[in-house]
Structure formats: structure tokens, C-alpha cells
Image: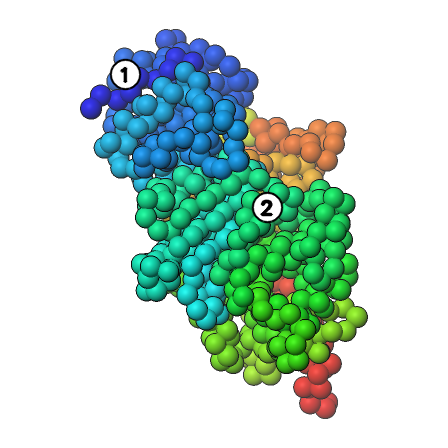
């Protein structure tokens, strides 16, 4: 089948040109310099020019530059980007999913009639996409477009990761006693939780009145585009309404205009928006859902908690994701106490950082159960289950999204819900939590095991001794060095001159594909991601091997090689390292200097570039965002033999610095551990 012709109005950046040609971005930049016939930019800026896709494709074919067959969907995506508007792109992607499944019309309930009307450009693009789907298949076509749309707008949209959705569904399945006929997600986003629920209960025996599967799937989101994409995702997965379950997805503000107010769900799964101020505090002051007190303006999350509690059928289960602060903020203590007294809040589960956006925070999962009103004697549970999975980082062979060991987390949570004890789980009497704080943070109530403390203490001392030994060795060598009297000053040469002479190559870091960046323990085939050289401690960032290979091939990523010199160019964070853990993927504030080892020693280069005086001369320091011009940095002109001698000294300096930092870090851990043991009376007398 012939590939669809591209619209002449579609513009593409250099990275897309490289992707089409199957080469690196540096090769495309070379073509621009060497070939006068290379198409001129039609927009953008000097730093980020945009080119006509039609002209680029004609030039590439004419010059024989397309070496491999380009995936048709890859070629079609720039036309979606050319629509420009986030909503227009998203609604068209939703239309693709629905049309592929024979579901034309408005993508979701509550949308204006105009939402399903396409202009000429969109209609043509939809037609070409459907033609391509005839060979690629509906699921692959829609999945590609949705993934690209989410990646393009990753800063605006937080998606519930698949493993977290599966965990939440598992929790509901373990806790719920009867058949699950209706599942509701009142903040459905792109539909990940509803899809997980469909897989779990659609074909479960006896889960609907007909005994053939889940009866109803209900979703709502205030963002019309996300609601439409949810409807399309469900349709592509086979949930078209032609057979159970019955599907209803609505675009409306759930707290202000609940489209499913008459629904009482057996299971509610929800990852609601957090930290909102304009959620309807004043206009909803007398709302009947606030059975445990009107949520303060700053506690929008507790409005969602009570909304979900009100939406549950008798015995129904609600599982929701919340920021950890909701468990402890002073403003919400009265509502938390009410939830405990009524027996509605049954479990709080702390997840490790990296489990879901925002990845730097360890989120909580709250489990609610309807039926405990507290009005009848003995109906309220005497205890609540607290689970802390924060230590469940990945082990070899169990790597999950975000560096989280989802297999072990699921095992721990399921055992805790089934009443089995174990490390990280505790059952706390409700009366013990009803103090002035009503703090439900699991780590606050889970006792530390003495055996674990002793093992950890021994490991810390072993690490302390190792750092101390390496530090003594490095200090012994460095302390023996005697500065010589200044003689003739060595002539200096700039990095720009070294680049012109071919002694090194400068490779600037680039914007990172944030949707693919993982956090946590890095697997053996993962490449670490560097966004700076002086960042505080936190989860390690890394990219899967597939993403690195594709990004390096297209020139969309800057990937280091062994012994590359990495420079952080922001003046306030200026630093220089030799990359001994390559490959590393560099962010936009970094650059890599790749040296010719026959004329330049990388350790010598790094040591000279890192000198504070060198950075002062090469930077502007006009503001905190000023950058150091790498090409203006200078190094002495030494012979290769002399460079290597100085380079070896710099190796010792970096070892001394690394071990000093490690000793300080482990020393701090030891002080804290010994203090904890002391406060619990677990240290022997001296």
C-alpha cells in the first residue's frame, strides 16, 4: 500500500528529520552545512529551526539519504503535531480509537456537539490514519498515537502507571467480599484504572446479574480530552457497550457536577488531583457528601475521600492514591478522626518514591469500606492496618516502573490485608490514633526490628571502615606532594582551539524524554541519566536500553562514552567529571568533551577545566542562571607524558573527594542509627 502523502504545511524539527532519515542529529546538521540544496527553515528559531516535512522528504529521496524504511506511523505523527493545539490533537487521537472500533460520534458524554466535528485537515489526517490501521491493527495504531501524545504533553498530564493500577485492583479484589458489578473512577484521566478493573472483573464468574461478567464501568473527568481518551481506550480494549459491561464516561467536574450521583459502586478506584485550591469549597459548603465535616479549602484531597465514601454501595471498597501529607496535615485531623470512628478508613499503605508521579514523593494508598457508620454498637472496627512498603526497591530480576519492586510490594500488601504479620505491617487500635494529631503515616507507627537495626549498624560500620581506608591511602599520596616554585608559565590553549585542532569534540546535552525516564535502582542494561553533577541525594534516574538506542540513533539523546569529560555549564553548579560509568545520558545543562587520547589526556583536561579560576574567567555571572562558556575554558599546553602525570594526580584528588563525601554520608547514618538505638534503650552500657 502506498504511504500517505504528507501535508506541505507540516513542519518538523531537526530531531524529526533525523528520525525520518534513520541517522543522528549531527548528521543532519552536517547535511545543512555541506549541501546548498538542503531545504531552508520555514519557522522556529536559529537554535531550533523548523522545516517543511514535504520538502525534507523530497530532498532525502532525491539525495538517497533514506537508508531504511520509515515506519508509516512515525511519518504521520508530525501531522498531528502540526495541529498545534493539545486538545485538538488529543480529541483526534480519541476519534481514531473510536472509529477503529466502529464507535463514531462524541468521544465522551457531556462534550459539546462541536467536539466531534473535524475540520478538513483533521478529517484528512483521520482518513489516512485509519488506512494505515488496516495493516498495523487498531490496538497498535491507537497505542502509538496515545503514547506519543502523552509524551508530548508529559508536563501537563500525570498518568497512573500500569503496575500501580494493578496493585489497586488487587487490593479491591482481596478486600471485597462479594460480586463486583459496578466499578467507578470519578477522576479517570486516560482510563488506566478502569482498564485494569475490566481485566480483573469482566470475565470473573458471577460478577454480574447475568453471571457473564462485570455489569457497569463508570468514569468521569473534568478534562474533556482525557475523558474522550478514556472512552477510546476502553473501546480499543473491547468495551464498546455492545456486550457487558455497560460503559459510561462523562466529561464534567466531579465535585461540582457529579454525573454518577445515582450510582452506588461496588468498587471505586481513583487517583484524584492533588493540592487544589479552586475545588468548590465555598459553593459546596452544605453538600451532603461531607458526612465527616466540610473539608478545609486546603484539603481538596479529603473532599475526594468523602466523595468516594458516599459513592460506595453497602460493603463497597474504595482504593485511592493520595499525597503523604494528607495523613498528617493538622487541618484535616477532624475528618481523619471521623473516618476512623465510623470504620470507613480501613488501611493506609505507604509506597516508595518513584511509584507514580510526582516520582520524588512516596505516595499513600487509602482503602475505604462502606457500611461502618458508627451508629450501631460494635459496627466500627477496633483496628486499622498500616503498611509501609517504602523499602521495596527493586532487586535484580524484579525491576519495575520507577525502580520499584512491584512484585514484592503486592505480596506484602496482600499478606497484610489478609491479616498476616510481617516486617513493614502493623495493626493499630483506632483509639491509639485518636489523639491531637490523628497522624496516619505508617512509618510513624511501625516499630523498627532490633535484628534489622543491628544488621544495618554493622553494614554501616563496614562501609565507614572502607571509606576511611581509601581516604587514608589517597591522603598519603597527596600529602607527599610538594608544590614547586613557579618557573616559566606554561602557555594556555582554549577548548575552542582544541576543538578546531581535532583534539576533542563537544557534544551538548539535550532535552530528556521524561515519560521514559525511570527512577530508582538501575538495571544492568539501563543507562543513567545526568541532569547535573552536584544534585542532592535521591532516586537514581535512568533510561531503558531500548530508549537509549533509539535516541542515540536519531540524535535525540546525547550519550557518553567511557572517559568522556562531562561539564555542568550552569555557573552556580559548575563542575567537571570524567565519566567512568558510561554510557550516561546528558540533560540540557551538561555537555560531553570526547578527547583524542593520542594527543589529550581526559583526566588532565578535567582537572584543569574544573579549576574555580577557570570557570570565573569563562562565565558571565550576570544572574543565577548564567552559563559557563565551555569553549572559553583554558588548559596548559603540556606534552602527553606530562598530561598523564598530572592526570594521575587528579585521579587521586577525585578519589580523596569521593571517599571524603562517602565518609561524611555514612558517618551521618551512623549518628542517626546510634541515636535511635540509644533512645530505645538498645545500646549496652559502656
Question: Would you say 477 lies left or right of 599 here?
Answer: right
The image position of residue 414, as x and y in percent, is 46, 71
Q: Element under label 1?
A: helix
Alpha carbon separation for disc pair 1 and 2: 55 Å
The image position of residue 11, as x and y in percent, is 44, 18
Depicted 309 relative to depicted 505: above or below: below
Image marks 1 and 2: residues in contact by CB distance under 8 Å: no
The image position of residue 148, as x and y in percent, is 42, 35
**Coloring applied to the structure:** rainbow
**Residue 400 found in image quarter:** bottom left
Q: Nearer the viewer, mark 1 or mark 2?
A: 2
Farthest residue in the left direction?
A: 1
Viewer-proximal residue among 381 and 477: 381
Which residue position holds label 1? 61
Measuring 72% from the left and 35% from the top, which residue is drawn there?
624
Depicted 144 relative to depicted 387: above or below: above
Viewer-proximal residue among 679 and 509: 679
Q: Residues within 10 Å of mark 1 (few under 14, many from 20)?
A: few
Measuring 24% from the left and 31% from the top, which residue is drawn there?
134
Question: Would you say 561 lies left or right of 259 here?
Answer: left
Question: Would you say 6 lies left or right of 648 here?
Answer: left
Residue 258: image tag: 2
Amino acid at each position: 500500500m502506498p504511504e500517505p502523502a504528507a501535508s506541505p504545511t507540516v513542519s518538523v524539527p531537526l530531531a524529526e528529520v533525523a528520525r525520518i532519515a534513520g541517522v543522528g542529529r549531527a548528521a543532519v546538521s552536517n547535511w545543512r552545512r555541506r549541501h546548498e540544496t538542503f531545504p531552508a527553515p520555514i519557522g522556529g528559531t536559529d537554535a531550533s529551526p523548523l522545516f517543511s516535512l514535504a520538502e525534507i522528504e523530497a530532498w532525502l529521496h532525491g539525495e538517497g539519504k533514506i537508508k531504511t524504511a520509515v515506519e508509516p506511523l512515525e511519518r504521520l505523527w508530525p501531522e498531528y503535531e502540526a495541529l498545534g493545539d493539545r486538545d485538538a490533537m488529543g480529541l483526534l487521537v480519541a476519534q481514531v480509537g473510536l472509529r477503529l472500533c466502529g464507535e463514531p460520534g462524541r468521544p465522551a458524554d457531556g462534550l459539546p456537539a462541536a467536539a466531534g466535528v473535524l475540520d478538513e485537515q483533521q478529517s484528512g489526517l483521520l482518513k489516512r490514519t485509519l488506512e494505515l490501521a488496516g495493516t498495523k491493527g487498531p490496538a497498535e495504531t491507537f497505542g502509538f498515537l496515545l503514547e506519543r501524545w502523552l509524551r508530548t504533553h508529559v508536563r501537563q498530564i500525570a498518568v497512573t502507571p500500569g503496575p500501580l493500577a494493578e496493585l489497586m485492583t488487587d487490593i479491591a479484589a482481596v478486600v471485597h467480599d462479594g460480586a463486583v458489578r459496578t466499578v467507578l473512577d470519578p477522576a479517570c484521566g486516560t482510563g488506566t484504572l478502569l482498564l485494569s478493573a475490566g481485566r480483573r472483573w469482566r470475565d470473573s464468574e458471577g460478577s454480574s446479574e447475568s453471571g457473564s461478567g462485570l455489569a457497569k464501568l463508570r468514569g468521569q473527568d473534568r478534562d474533556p480530552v482525557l475523558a474522550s481518551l478514556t472512552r477510546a481506550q476502553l473501546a480499543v480494549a473491547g468495551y464498546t457497550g455492545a456486550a457487558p459491561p455497560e460503559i459510561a464516561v462523562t466529561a464534567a467536574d466531579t465535585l461540582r457536577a457529579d454525573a454518577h450521583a445515582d450510582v452506588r459502586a461496588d468498587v471505586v478506584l481513583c487517583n484524584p488531583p492533588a493540592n487544589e485550591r479552586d475545588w468548590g469549597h465555598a459553593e459546596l459548603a452544605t453538600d451532603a457528601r461531607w458526612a465527616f465535616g466540610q473539608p478545609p479549602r486546603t484539603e481538596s484531597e479529603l473532599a475526594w475521600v468523602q466523595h468516594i465514601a458516599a459513592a460506595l454501595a453497602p460493603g463497597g471498597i474504595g482504593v485511592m492514591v493520595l499525597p503523604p501529607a494528607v495523613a498528617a496535615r493538622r487541618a484535616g485531623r477532624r475528618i481523619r478522626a471521623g473516618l476512623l470512628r465510623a470504620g470507613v478508613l480501613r488501611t493506609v499503605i505507604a509506597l516508595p518514591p518513584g511509584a507514580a508521579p510526582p516520582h520524588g514523593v512516596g505516595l499513600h494508598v487509602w482503602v475505604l469500606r462502606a457500611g461502618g457508620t458508627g451508629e450501631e454498637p460494635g459496627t466500627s472496627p477496633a483496628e486499622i492496618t498500616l503498611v509501609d512498603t517504602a523499602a521495596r526497591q527493586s532487586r535484580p530480576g524484579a525491576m519495575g516502573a520507577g525502580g520499584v519492586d512491584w512484585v514484592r510490594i503486592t505480596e506484602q500488601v496482600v499478606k497484610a490485608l489478609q491479616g498476616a504479620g510481617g516486617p513493614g505491617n502493623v495493626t493499630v487500635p483506632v483509639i491509639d490514633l485518636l489523639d491531637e494529631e490523628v497522624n496516619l503515616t505508617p512509618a510513624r507507627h511501625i516499630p523498627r526490628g532490633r535484628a534489622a537495626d543491628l544488621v544495618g549498624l554493622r553494614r554501616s560500620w563496614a562501609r565507614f571502615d572502607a571509606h576511611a581506608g581509601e581516604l587514608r591511602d589517597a591522603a598519603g599520596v597527596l600529602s607527599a606532594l610538594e608544590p614547586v616554585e613557579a618557573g616559566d608559565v606554561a602557555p594556555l590553549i582554549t577548548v575552542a582551539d582544541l576543538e578546531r585542532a581535532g583534539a576533542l569534540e563537544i557534544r551538548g546535552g539535550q532535552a530528556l524524554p521524561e515519560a521514559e525516564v525511570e527512577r530508582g535502582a538501575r538495571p544492568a542494561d539501563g543507562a543513567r541519566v545526568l541532569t547535573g553533577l552536584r544534585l542532592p541525594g535521591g532516586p537514581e534516574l535512568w533510561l531503558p536500553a531500548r530508549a537509549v538506542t533509539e535516541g542515540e540513533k536519531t540524535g535525540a539523546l546525547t550519550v557518553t562514552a567511557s572517559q568522556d569529560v562531562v561539564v555542568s555549564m550552569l555557573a552556580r553548579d559548575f563542575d567537571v567529571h570524567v565519566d567512568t560509568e558510561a554510557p550516561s545520558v546528558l540533560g540540557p545543562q551538561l555537555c560531553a568533551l570526547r578527547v583524542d587520547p593520542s594527543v589529550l589526556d581526559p583526566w588532565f583536561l578535567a582537572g584543569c577545566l574544573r579549576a574555580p579560576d577557570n570557570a570565573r574567567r569563562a562565565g558571565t555571572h550576570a544572574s543565577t542562571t548564567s552559563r559557563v562558556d565551555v569553549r572559553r575554558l583554558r588548559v596548559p599546553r603540556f606534552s602527553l607524558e606530562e598530561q598523564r602525570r598530572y592526570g594521575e594526580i587528579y585521579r587521586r584528588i577525585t578519589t580523596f573527594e569521593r571517599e571524603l563525601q562517602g565518609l561524611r554520608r555514612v558517618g551521618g547514618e551512623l549518628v542517626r542509627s546510634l541515636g535511635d538505638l540509644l533512645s530505645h534503650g538498645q545500646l549496652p552500657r559502656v
